[in-house]
Amino acid sequence: MWPFRCDFLSQYTHHHVVVFLLTFFSYVLLHSSRKTFSNVKVSISAQWTPSVLNSTLPPYSPGETWEENRMFSDPQEATLFLGVLDTIFLFSYAVGLYISGVMGDRLNLRYVLTFGLCGSAVVEFVFGTVTEWMAFYNVYFYCGLWVCNGLLQSAVWPCVVAVMGNWFGKSGRGFIFGLWSACASVGNILGAFLASSVLAYGYEYAFLVTSAVQFAGGVVVFFGLLTSPKEIGLSVDSDTGLRPVERDSDSQRPLMSDEEEEEEEEGGVCEDPPRAIGFLQAFCLPGVIPYSLAYACLKLVNYSFFFWLPFYLSNNFGWPEVQADRLSVWYDVGGIIGKQPRVSVSVWYDVGGIIGGTVQGLISDMLGKRAPVIAVSLLVAMGALVGYSRSPDDKVVNAALLATTGFFIGGPSNMISSAISADLGRQDALQGSQEALATVTGIVDGTGSIGAAAGQYLVSLIESKLNWMWVFYFFVLMTGGSVLFIFPLIVGELRSMCRYRQAQASQL
């Protein structure tokens, strides 16, 4: 167990700050545009079933006008199709992660990242804005666009994690990555407010605003991001300090080890760069499979809140869609601050996730172990889910319960997808094959996305056949499954902590 260093921030330079901010806001913009779809589901459903929602206005709106745009006969069918779109997106995203992780370890990370950001922005603009302006509604066209969107967005996360891994070493990784992984929650918050601010003009403008901002962000990343210290003639040692090195012609290669790399052999000849690890080799690394399966269960729950929370608040409590959008963001903010909502509720889930990831990452740094911290958080999360399922029709109480749920679910989710993925991609078992961070990140996040994809259709199915209470019971079951998958790792790390304490006691 290595001691936590309170002064580790002093080791970072302005290069670290720039990289942190550029990668952070890259994923903020991606998630803000992704959040738009979940925030406008009620409006989209209304547009796809106009004959039902506008049946009270026949004198002013002839029936044939509404029938021209109708895709579904009732809102329930539209809701099921929205669940299908979520599933299609996440399955495509999962498949893309397995591919983009391997690509990220072999190609220039900046190119892959920019392509994902800008390409996804174009697809979302066509999906939400162009189709509405042209009054073109087609189930198969929507499905095809969402497949492309999932594949394009999958290129972003492995790349930004790999870039962060290049610049930030082992010291304080839990806290730094915990703080940085708030990017998804901040993106949810930004997306919710952007969407709600223009939703009165039509849901197409919500897609227009977020996709335009995302495309602009991709351009900034292309011209401003340094993917590795080697691009400026520096390298990272085991304590994250920068030191001069001879420039490498393949400067975008991720630095997979925290140990100082030997740059020269006898006679001043540089070593051949290590090759990227194979996909199957990465999959079989210690800890990758347990954490991947645990993340599949956990991401199912986390993304169900992400995709369905505004819809749940609007339909279960009858709150206006704009208020539900803003309120749902507090799930992520429960991760930032503990203030009560003044304007919305769903925002609190995102707030909770931000605080949860940062605090739990800091605690795991201090303990030197990740799994026990995650296990305790998830066990408490099971109770928090039951409590939230019984929330009264009160925005303040709902927001408080939502922030608590976000803290204990979003926190572990952020840790597994960032800090733990970095740990797994830099472990001793890699030996000479050091380029594994993007591949391992793609495997963990890809497996998680498969679970999340299956979950989105199950949520819509359970809700339509039973009710929302059974959906929350399903969430509790999946959260418990996450703990079971990493149980052997929890036991191993607890034993390691006990041995360490016994060794310290024997020296006194």
Image: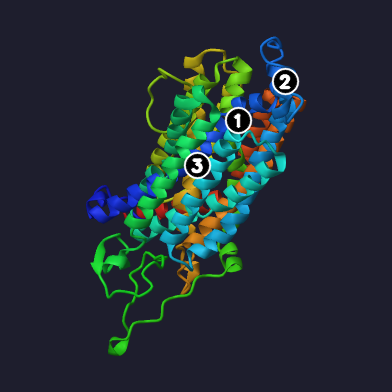
Give the camera-side residue of 152 and 378. 152
Residue drawn at point x = 53 percent, y = 41 percent: 125
What x and y, as percent, mark residue 155? Answer: 51, 55
What x and y, as percent, mark residue 36? Answer: 52, 34
264 relative position to 391: left or right: left
Q: How packed is label 2: few (under 14 Cα within 10 Å), some, or many (20 or more)?
A: many
Q: How far is mark 1 from mark 3, CA to CA?
A: 20 Å
Marks 1 & 3, CB-CB < 8 Å contact: no
Q: How far is mark 1 from mark 2, CA to CA?
A: 24 Å
Tag 2: amino acid? Ser
What x and y, as percent, mark residue 83? Answer: 68, 35
Residue drawn at point x = 44 percent, y = 25 percent: 197
42 relative position to 63: left or right: left
Mark closest to the chain's N terminus, 1 or 3: 1
Mark closest to the chain's N terminus, 2 or 3: 2
Q: Quadrant of residue 59?
A: top right
In which quadrant will I find the N terminus?
bottom left
Tag 1: amino acid? Trp
Mark number displayed over residue 308: 1
Mark closest to the chain's N terminus, 1 or 2: 2
The residue to which callout 3 is attached is 412
The kind of secondary structure element at disc 1 is helix
40 relative position to 362: left or right: right
